[in-house]
Image (cartoon, helix red, strand yellow):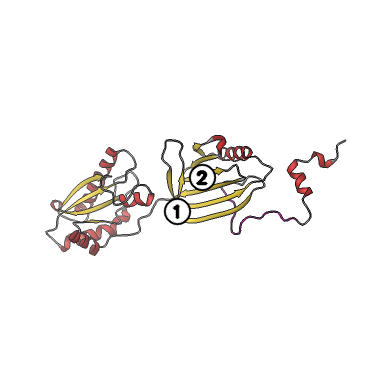
């Protein structure tokens, strides 16, 4: 009959043979596993980062642009046990994520990198052959418009530059109906028009570059028309002082390469006629 210790798995036997008093590695201070994905057994957290609002870069595969996701950001770095092979770690985490119901957007196979998402939660796993792996998790949040243009700012922009961005006019994604939260911004526009009875403006809608060009042009036109309709029907402004125009993605104020930039490019402007 074989002795008891010979029946134990190798990694367990190593634990029994470790010298007395040898301390096992501990997780880095302040770091803990994500509730969304458990660590590979025996791994140790070597570092982490948690931010309320940041941007994660998620590869989507060869020939495809990376996806930039903004939101609640978490990063975890692990060292996995020397007794485990990279292939074992890849297979284990890959299977766990798939079983949890995540959709794979990019999978490098044995190389060990993959991007998955479920709803607005995105996870990037990068597994190294050197005994470590990293998880990047971003829970996507929609950028909120917190700045509402004032009549003074609008008037100054129209006078000095001939145009001004109307911060605070909001729409749901892909829709042209003005959201009720836009009321304060409309009141400021009305003040500007009331202060100068001769002032006539173009109401210009702008979009980012995401999606088809024709669709963006039409959406920007519809949004500009919705703003004009709101000003005339609800606030009594004369229709001959307002003209709607959709400029789509043709006049960005900044780069569309980041979500922050795209948010700034999605805007409504007043342009002096």
Please name whichever residue, 61 or 139, is drawn nearer the observer in this view of the structure. Answer: 61
The image position of residue 220, as x and y in percent, is 26, 45
Task: Name the residue tied to disc 2.
Answer: 123
Q: Which mark is residue 54?
A: 1
Callout 1: few (<14), some (14-19), or many (20+) C-alpha neighbours within 10 Å?
some
Using the rendered view, name the quadrant where residue 248 is placed: top left
Principal SS element in the magenta part? loop
Look at 42% across and 46% down and name the residue there. 68
The foreground one among 88 and 152 is 88
Q: Is residue 221 left or right of residue 99?
A: left
How far from the left and from the top, in percent, is residue 40? 63, 45
Do the residues under discs 2 and 1 have CB atoms within 8 angstroms?
Answer: no
Q: Which residues are magenta?
A: 22-35
Asked if residue 34 shows in the view, the reply is no
- Residue 25: where, in percent of width, then height? 67, 54
Secondary structure beneath dot 2 equals strand
Please give the name of the residue rendered at 25% of the width and 60% of the height, measured from the top-left corner.
Answer: 187
Q: SS of the residue at dot 1?
A: strand
Does 2 lie within the magenta span? no
- Residue 252 relative to residue 42: left or right: left
Q: Position of residue 162 (x, y in %)?
A: 18, 56
> Please, is residue 186 above or below residue 132 in the view?
below
Q: Earlier in the sequence, mark 2 or mark 1?
A: 1
Q: Could you tell me how far apart the alpha carbons at marks 2 and 1 are, in whole angstroms?
A: 14 Å
Along the viewing direction, whichever of 194 and 153 lies nearer the viewer: 153
Q: Is residue 102 above or below residue 200?
A: above
């Amino acid at each position: 009959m074989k002795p008891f210790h010979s029946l134990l798995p190798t990694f367990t036997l190593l634990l029994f043979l470790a010298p007395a008093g040898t301390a096992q590695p501990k997780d880095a201070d302040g770091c803990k596993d994500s509730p969304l994905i458990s660590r590979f057994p025996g791994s140790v957290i070597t570092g982490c980062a948690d931010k309320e609002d940041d941007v994660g870069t998620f590869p989507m595969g060869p020939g495809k642009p990376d996806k930039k996701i903004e939101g609640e950001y978490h990063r975890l770095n692990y060292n996995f046990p020397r007794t485990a092979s990279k292939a074992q770690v890849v297979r284990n985490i890959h299977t766990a994520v798939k079983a949890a119901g995540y959709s794979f957007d990019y999978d490098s196979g044995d190389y060990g990198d993959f991007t998955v998402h479920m709803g607005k939660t995105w996870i990037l796993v990068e597994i190294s052959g050197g005994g470590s792996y990293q998880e990047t998790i971003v829970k996507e949040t929609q950028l909120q418009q917190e700045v509402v243009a004032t009549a003074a700012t609008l008037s100054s922009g129209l006078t000095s530059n001939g145009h001004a961005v109307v911060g605070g006019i909001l729409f749901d994604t892909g829709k042209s109906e003005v959201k009720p939260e836009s009321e304060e911004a409309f009141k400021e526009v009305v003040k500007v028009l009331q202060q100068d009875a001769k002032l006539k403006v173009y109401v210009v809608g702008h979009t980012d570059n995401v999606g088809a060009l024709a669709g963006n042009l039409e959406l920007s036109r519809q949004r500009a028309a919705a703003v004009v309709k709101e000003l005339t029907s609800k606030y009594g402004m004369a229709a001959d002082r307002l003209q709607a125009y959709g400029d789509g993605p043709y006049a960005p104020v900044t780069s569309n390469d980041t979500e922050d930039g795209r948010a700034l490019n999605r805007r409504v402007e007043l342009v002096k006629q």
